[in-house]
């Protein structure tokens, strides 16, 4: 069976060798032995590199790629990506410190997110990173803190646009939002930035995430550029950075298709000449997290027990929602759908069965697979949840019920 692949479109990124998933050049069984315990997350560095190469191939050369660290803040992943991307976007002081531990210079690190505390702002000001301001109150506080230490803070305005990214899994703009400053209030804020003497860098306009509709992303890019050009007329100085967000999605479930990056890139090539004419000094930034790392990662746990209840088979595993909340369906899903799951050391088998895979937690929410047809699994076989490189361990309630933490490895 060497070289064969499973049928599900979301399972084709890793080779299958002798019926066993291979990641980072290692068979899953050998990797599990190397890690020394289950559950664990494994991220394939070559797949991450290939994803950046794909983006570089299809997006215009003028586009600056930033990594949104919240998608996966594992230090080894960040260190690897710091050599491949043009900037890193963080959402906490903890993430800021991790970014500054890499080769990335401080002026290419930006800090977004509402509710920043005074000491967090002080740390960012001292570091010299760019603060994406989320409110007028935050702007005034930044100016005050900068004056106290004699540093002119680098700032940008995060804008809540008057439009949304249609068909996005999570809408971050349009309508009332806790994120950013409503577009109609931004002109006055820009004038105030000039009076306060802050070092104005640009605008951050982020509309939504996890989108698989090229037309929606293309339309949003057009509207984002129009809004950026309009707001720039009120800026205290030239726009140095226009961050148009990300939102590029990946397929998780049957029926979902891979995003056509070439089409998105061609649309950007069409739009950029006019944008550069209006904003000649602006670097155009696309900020991506999930799209860069999600498909490069897997979550692995071990079958502890086969259990039958009223004619249904349950595989009880040593991992669950405390490590992978998203796969349990409790992170953003309205109607629960199964992530792509396989028996990693028995990917393809003539003996199939319909089973549910549950974790060790005493809650019915601890469900990794609900009535999926899989290769028949026995105790000690390895369950693999695919598409797990983003919003995995750090987006999960790891302290729930006091179970051990999962290990993370980059291979």
Image (spheres, grey):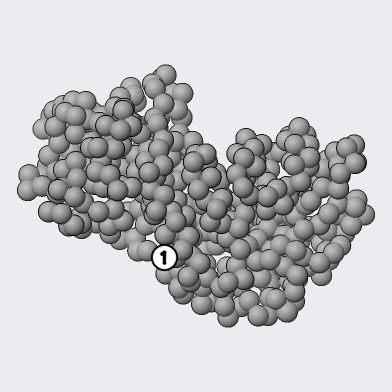
Residue 170 visible to the viewer: no
Q: Nearer the viewer, residue 262 or 188?
A: 262
How many badges with numbers are in the image?
1
Q: Secondary structure beneath disc 1?
A: loop
Which residue is depicted at the point 18% across and 38% down? 355
Point out the image quarter for the N terminus: bottom left
Q: In which quadrant is the C terminus drawn?
A: top left
Residue in the picture at 65% in, 66% down: 284
Q: Nearer the viewer, residue 34 or 66?
A: 34
Find residue 296 and report its horizontal and vertical position in percent: 39, 50
Most extreme residue toward the right, as rendered?
A: 195
Foreground residue, 184 or 107?
107
Please give left or right for residue 181 compared with residue 272 in the image.
right
Q: Label 1: which residue?
A: 259
386 versus 191 height, above or below:
above
Residue 206 placement, left or right of 264: right
Q: Residue at x 62, y 71 (%)?
A: 62
The image shows residue 227 at horizontal and vertical percentages of 70, 68
Please determine whether, in this image, residue 53 is positioned above or below residue 352: below
Nearer to us in this view, 69 or 47: 47
Q: Residue at x 18, y 57 (%)?
A: 3
Q: Quadrant of residue 224?
A: bottom right
Asked if residue 235 can be seen in this view, the reply is yes
Residue 321 relative to residue 29: left or right: right
User: Residue 131, how many percent across, how many down?
Assistant: 73, 48
Give the quadrant of residue 158.
bottom right
Residue 238: percent from left, percent from top: 81, 66
């Amino acid at each position: 069976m060497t070289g064969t692949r499973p049928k599900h479109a979301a399972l084709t990124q890793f080779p299958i060798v002798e019926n066993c998933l291979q990641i980072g050049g290692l068979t899953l069984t050998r990797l599990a032995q190397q890690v020394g315990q289950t559950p664990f997350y494994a991220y394939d560095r070559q797949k991450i590199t290939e994803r950046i190469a794909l983006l570089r191939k299809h997006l215009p050369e003028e586009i600056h790629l930033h990594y949104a660290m919240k998608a996966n803040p594992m230090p080894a992943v960040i260190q690897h990506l710091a050599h491949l991307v043009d900037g890193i976007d963080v959402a906490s002081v903890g993430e800021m410190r991790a970014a500054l531990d890499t080769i990335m210079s401080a002026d290419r690190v930006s800090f977004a997110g509402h509710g920043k505390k005074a000491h967090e702002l002080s740390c960012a000001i001292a570091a010299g990173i760019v603060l994406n301001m989320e409110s007028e109150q935050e702007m005034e506080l930044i100016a005050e803190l900068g004056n106290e230490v004699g540093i002119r803070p680098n700032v940008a305005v995060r804008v809540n646009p008057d439009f949304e990214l249609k068909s996005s899994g999570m809408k971050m703009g349009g309508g009332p939002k806790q994120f950013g400053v409503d577009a109609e209030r931004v002109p006055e804020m820009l004038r105030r930035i000039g009076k306060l003497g802050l070092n104005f860098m640009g605008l951050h306009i982020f509309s939504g995430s996890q989108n698989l509709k090229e037309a929606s992303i293309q339309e949003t890019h057009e509207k984002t550029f129009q809004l950026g050009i309009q707001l720039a007329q009120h800026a205290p100085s030239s726009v140095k950075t226009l961050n148009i967000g990300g939102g590029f999605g990946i397929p998780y479930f049957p029926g979902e298709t891979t995003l056509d990056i070439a089409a998105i890139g061609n649309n950007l090539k069409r739009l950029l000449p006019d944008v550069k004419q209006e904003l000649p000094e602006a670097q155009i930034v696309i900020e991506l997290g999930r799209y860069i790392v999600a498909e490069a990662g897997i979550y692995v746990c071990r079958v502890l027990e086969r259990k039958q209840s009223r004619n249904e088979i349950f595989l009880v595993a040593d991992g669950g929602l405390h490590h992978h909340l998203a796969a349990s369906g409790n992170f953003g899903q309205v109607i629960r759908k199964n992530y792509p799951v396989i028996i990693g050391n028995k990917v393809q088998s003539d003996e199939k069965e319909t089973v549910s895979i549950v974790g060790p937690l005493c809650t019915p929410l601890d469900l990794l697979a609900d009535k999926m047809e899989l290769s028949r699994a026995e105790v000690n076989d390895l369950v693999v949840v695919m598409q797990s490189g983003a919003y995995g361990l750090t987006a999960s309630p790891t302290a729930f019920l006091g179970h051990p933490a999962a290990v993370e490895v980059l291979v």
